[in-house]
Image (cartoon, rainbow, N blue to C red):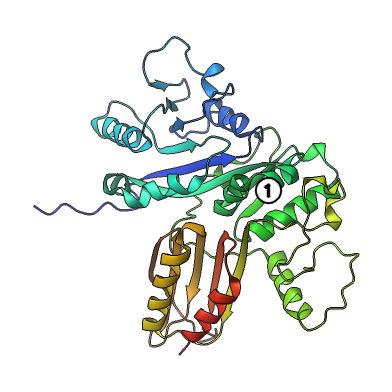
Amino acid sequence: MNTAAPTTDTMIPVTVLTGFLGAGKTTLLRRILTEFHGQRIAVIENEFGEENIDNDVLVQDSDEQIVELSNGCVCCTVRGDLIRTLNDLASRRKAGAIHFDRVIIETTGMANPGPVCQTFFMDDDIAEAYRLDAVITVVDAKHGMATLDRQEEAQRQVGFADRILISKKDLVNEADYEALRARLVRINPRASITPAHFGETDLHTLLDVSGFDLDAILDIDPEFLAEEEAHAHDHHDHSHDHDHDHAHDDEDGYHECGPSCGHDHHHAHHSDEIGAFVFRSNKAFDPERLEDFLGGIVQVYGPDLLRYKGILYIKGINRRMVFQGVHMMMGAEPGTPWKASEKPNTRLVFIGRKLPQDIFTQGLEQCLA
């Protein structure tokens, strides 16, 4: 008997909430769990610190792992396997035992969101029931620079994000805020960045982001593109003016700068392990060569590739191909046809750890028809 494949409408959307320790994830989550927003949200928590949400919101003496709240939300503390918990929630929902519209997974402050995201592509039961919607990362404006300097996991959280919320903006001056924002853009030019005061943010901007949908728009921060253009020109003229804020300086694009750089961050670029670059071309790709190259790249650099996404111009295909990947898993599908008024082109953004931009760029150029 053939059963129909699940549609996007019937799948349960999932948001992964991550962020630096003390950045304000719990404040945001507490707001989601106590506000009357008309959505029934199941929150899966794997935070084991003293900041657990159930200290304030949930019933203390309940033996039940899953607790329903007064506004219809459901809270579940994960002490074991995430896959088992997700399957249990889906089964209970299907049986009518609990009701919820979507899931938010809060990761620990030190967690790499990669394995959590991969769960939704690797496990068949999970992939059938759930649709990964977005990764939301909360960054602390006051300690963000120092945390990024010290913790590569914090850089990974930024690199994986579809939305970045900056908390505690009121505790820093405008120059330091802009310096942090510019650094976040360099690590991840495809995430939108907005300040959030004490978890007060428009929840609609965090839900239904479609960050992992292939046909979602590829937006790259224009500041990053402007920097990239400036960097390309800098290779031809190395007489730099060193009194500027955002232009690239060295071959990697940033000054070396450790936690002891002092507070004048807007004159110091940081050399982050996680970074991004964009590949663009107006020439079409040869499909076979491109497939071979991407397959090889993923085998070699998969663990260091966090997110990669783009629009591909393929020879012999009169519509754009939409492409994206997480670590070693990638996919492509046909997008909208090229209009008569637009010039077909390729735009690919790669976010990862110490990726060799020259190898990627040269390899991709050799795949052009």
Measured along the vertical axis of the image, is residue 312 above or below residue 139? below
Residue 257 in percent (x, y) is at 78, 54
**Can residue 195 be seen?**
no
Q: Is residue 205 left or right of residue 248?
A: left
Residue 202 in percent (x, y) is at 61, 41
Q: Nearer the viewer, residue 351 or 204?
A: 351
Q: Quadrant of residue 355?
A: bottom right
**Can residue 64 be seen?**
yes
Looking at the image, which residue is at 82% across and 45% down?
A: 260
User: Residue flagged by tag 1: what amino acid is it?
Assistant: Thr
Q: Is residue 41 left or right of residue 141?
A: left
Q: Which residue is mark 1?
A: 194
Looking at the image, which residue is at 41% across and 22% down?
A: 68
Q: Quadrant of residue 318?
A: bottom left
Looking at the image, which residue is at 80% across and 38% down?
A: 170
Looking at the image, which residue is at 47% across and 54% down?
A: 210
